Image (cartoon, helix red, strand yellow):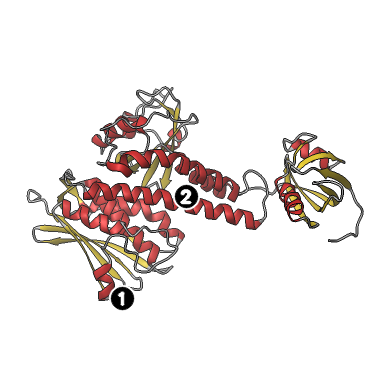
Amino acid sequence: MRSDGTVLARATSDGEDRLIEADEPLAGLHLRCGGQLPGTIAVPELLELVRKARRFRFPLARAVSAHDGGDVITAWVEAQPSETGDGCDIRVRNWRSAPMPHEDSTASEARRATTDRQLAELTATLDAGQRLLAVETTSAELVALAGAMESGIGRVWTEFLPPENVAHQQPLHWRLLDGTRVIVPGSGRTFHVRLLPSMQPGFDPAGFELLLLSDQPPPLAPTAPGTALPSNRRGLVGQELAPVLRQPIARIIANAETIRTRMAGPLPDAYAGYASEIASAGKLLLDLLDDLSDLEVVEARDFQTAPDQIDLGEVSRQAAGILNVRAQERGITLIAPDAAQSLPAIAEFRRVLQILLNLIGNAIRYSPEGSRVWIRLEPAGPMARVVVADEGEGLSLEEQGRLFAKFERLGRKGDGGSGLGLFISRRLARAMGGELSVESAPGQGARFRLEVPADPDAG
């Protein structure tokens, strides 16, 4: 431990890491951070330093940082286990104050969106005209609302969530609706919506992600027996476990993201890294819950889809629009069918979109940076085909044979997948009277082919 330099302030702590007495400027910082004298040390990095020194009975020293209003304080602090008690003697030898650096608004908004996604009790995918494409909820209180929205796929979302104090009718610019309070029928809580656009700079949004949030906790009553969640979700995971587990896991993720991004105050890089790992593990758990819920659905004996007349070109463009931002982050170019291309089919729009999102998402995840992913339409006699092709490493014949197996990840580690996406996608394709297959070779990328019945009435 260094002993040079003037001691600017002294303090003492007890065996419970409470600050018993302190000189200025440490005492003032402790009080402004919400502490009391005597009281638990309120500066997080100082608390960690003192706790370790007391626990290991070994003197420690390090630079400690803290937010103090609009300034960042950096101080060199030494913690020496007391010879006469269970606490520590604390010495401050250096103290510097600097204005807090301006935070990039884009990064701040991205963090806010990440947190809101974890706390949302209902999410919906919208097209460029704010029309509903898919709806998902984990809240028993919102089951009826989600069911009504699912029945109204293709209609504007404000028909089901009317904004408060907005007299104008749709279409309204999405920025006027982002953050507005909405009326949720049958609920006594207040809700607001967030609209997250999928867009490239200089272009209009290709679609939106709608998040329904409330600052009030949901009711604790469990899902009523026999009540099925939207998307045919039922069974132990989908109906009972997922709604109970999702909210606390989402809170863990949101708190971890707050720590990781240092929104609650400065932290060493190591602690921010730990918080990042916690958030990633939480997201993995949420994704696994979703996949297990879908697995229950597609393996149920009475599972059925709701086929309708759809345009595979439109579904493909919607899927590409939703994932375009993720592709851009990896430098990957998505090439979707242009607006003039159409391929009529008989299938369930939402399920086809779910399959394409999985195929395109996998292509983005496993393709090299700077490569391309194509989404092509191909008539195939009585079938209508969508092909998702990439420039990835490709697959051997042995890997192709295992690819659609349950929980199969082909030995990949750390990519966050559950190994259920392709299994579920193939089951969905077959439930619609179609098929999902792959054509590939090592070093030549992969071509995933989704086939569903063509629309015989199309001209």
* Res. 157 mark: none
Residue 149 x, y percent position in the rendering: 29, 34
Measuring 71% from the left and 47% from the top, which residue is drawn there? 100
Whether label 1 touches label 2, CB < 8 Å: no
Residue that lies at the very extreme toward the right in this rendered image: 6
Left/right of residue 283 with respect to residue 296 in the rendered view: right
Left/right of residue 403 with respect to residue 87 in the rendered view: left
Q: Is residue 361 above or below residue 306?
A: below
Asked whether residue 106 is in view, the answer is: yes
Measuring 39% from the left and 43% from the top, which residue is drawn there? 209
Q: Earlier in the sequence, mark 1 or mark 2?
A: 2
Between the residue at mark 1 and the residue at mark 2, the CA separation in whole angstroms equals: 35 Å
Q: Amino acid at mark 2?
A: Gly
Residue 31 x, y percent position in the rendering: 77, 36
Helix, strand or loop at disc 1?
Answer: loop
Give the camera-side residue of 372 and 121. Answer: 121
Left/right of residue 380 with respect to residue 116 in the rendered view: left
Give the camera-side residue of 134 and 229. Answer: 229
Asked whether residue 130 is in view, the answer is: no
Q: Amino acid at mark 1?
A: Gln
**Residue 138 is drawn in which quadrant?**
top left
Looking at the rendered image, the quarter that the N terminus falls into is bottom right
Measuring 11% from the left and 51% from the top, which residue is drawn there? 455
Q: Residues within 10 Å of mark 2 (few under 14, many from 20)?
A: many
Q: Is residue 407 above or below residue 24?
A: below
Nearer the observer, disc 1 or disc 2? 2
- Residue under pointer 2: 282
- Residue under pointer 1: 444
Residue 343 x, y percent position in the rendering: 17, 54
